[in-house]
Amino acid sequence: MTRVGILGATGAVGQRFIQLLDDHPDFELAAVTASEASAGETYKEAAKWRVDTPIPEDVASMTVRATDPDEVPDDVDLLFSSLPSSVAERVEPKFLDAGYVVSSNSSNDRLADDVPLVIPEINPEHLDLIEVQRDERGWDGALVKNPNCSTITMVPTLAALDRFGIERVHVSTLQAVSGAGYSGVSSMEIIDNAIPHIGGEEEKMETESRKLLGDFDGAEVEWHGAEVSASCNRIPTIDGHLENVWAELDEDPTVAEVYEAFADAPTQDLYTAPDPLIETFTEPDRPQPRLDRMVGGGMAVAAGGVQHTDSGIQYNCLAHNTIRGAAGASLLNGELLVEEGWV
Ligand SMILES: NC(=O)C1=CN([C@@H]2O[C@H](COP(=O)(O)OP(=O)(O)OC[C@H]3O[C@@H](n4cnc5c(N)ncnc54)[C@H](OP(=O)(O)O)[C@@H]3O)[C@@H](O)[C@H]2O)C=CC1
Ligand SMILES: N[C@@H](CC(=O)OP(=O)(O)O)C(=O)O
């Protein structure tokens, strides 16, 4: 068993970690941290539990610790981080200096040259950037990031299409309110409405996707050369980000060849990894958030509606933003870190 901890365990993503870690065959939850305001309380007292399964009994009675390396037991081998990025930026390096391996969902440092930004099925080899990171930063620990939830929804489909050569991508998103956290968008703002702006999200999709699809030569990642432009919108769904993608390719595949490429997407032999990675739908009105966000236990990407247009191949994709887009993504990176001997 690998003993794990969660930094920011009482939040929306932290709660998903707890749900996904319950009954995990290889990970044992040994520590939960949050802000000073929650430290010292039991988890049940500190967390405003919103997930649709009960708090596991053993977690409910755990004492929440302050988010400080001195508060976390030394025998914890792996930490998952779901702190606000402004906090993570300040706090994660302290854990890395103290020798912890951190699989983080927070957006700080995702684009740093020496930080692996990883989707295990797509670019597991980027994990070897840890060697470069340790040389450059002098850390005994290691920092690995998963991408933004909208980015991770689209990138597996782009990786599949890259066999035809991706030149240019346009994407328009319809993102669920849970992506902004429980108090992120007020009901008066979002009911009967759509908001055509999510701060920083477009830039994240445009940059993180190119790093994820880039080539790693053992020393650095050369970003993919495709042009990516994104337009991000908030809509009143609870979970599941739906995206309309236009991909301009070097080759001109048939619709059937595109579906075949999606169905061939690689998988990983890891506990939380779905198989297949991409569930395909040939019905023109799928995928839909309410119907399809739980494909592969919330860890798969749903894709469908493939057609030829004057702007290239057009299709729709969808993933669960707090599972594949957040806690599940970090958890899967943790499983890869263990599998590859970094923990
Ligand atoms: N919600 C989502 O769908 C997604 C979120 N993310 C990212 O994941 C991260 C967490 O998001 P989310 O769970 O929604 O956020 P929440 O605000 O729900 O939770 C934040 C967590 O961090 C803790 N925390 C806050 N301030 C501090 C501090 N100063 N020191 C230590 N701990 C602190 C909170 O503890 P306390 O309860 O004591 O305040 C809580 O446990 C963010 O970086 C977010 O951008 C990424 C993808 C999707
Ligand atoms: N911005 C995303 C959620 C999020 O927090 O993303 P990131 O992990 O890049 O901070 C959304 O609103 O749906």
Image (cartoon, rainbow, N blue to C red):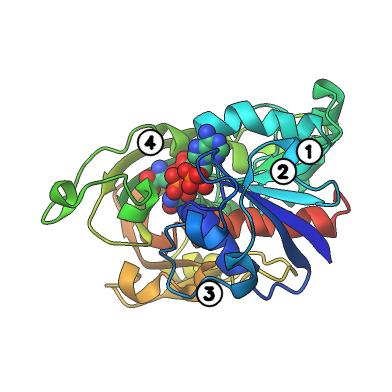
Dot 2 alpha-carbon crowd within 10 angstroms: few under 14, some 14 to 19, many 20 or more: many
Q: Which type of secondary structure does the marked residue at label 4 adopt?
A: helix
Labelled pair 1, 4 in contact (Cβ < 8 Å)? no
Residue 128 is at least partly visible in this image: yes
Instruction: Give the residue at x 63% y 41%.
Output: 66
Q: Earlier in the sequence, mark 1 or mark 2?
A: 2
In the rendered structure, the answer to whether residue 235 lies left or right of residue 313 reads: left
Q: Nearer the viewer, mark 4 or mark 2?
A: 2
Q: Residue 94 at what x, y percent from top left?
A: 72, 29
Q: Earlier in the sequence, mark 3 or mark 1?
A: 1
Front one among 330 and 284: 330
Q: Residue 271 at what x, y percent from top left?
A: 71, 71
Q: Which mark is residue 297?
A: 3
Q: Which mark is residue 202?
A: 4
Q: Earlier in the sequence, mark 4 or mark 3?
A: 4
* 336 vs 90: above or below: below
Q: CA distance from mark 3 to mark 1?
A: 28 Å
The residue indicated by pointer 2 is 102
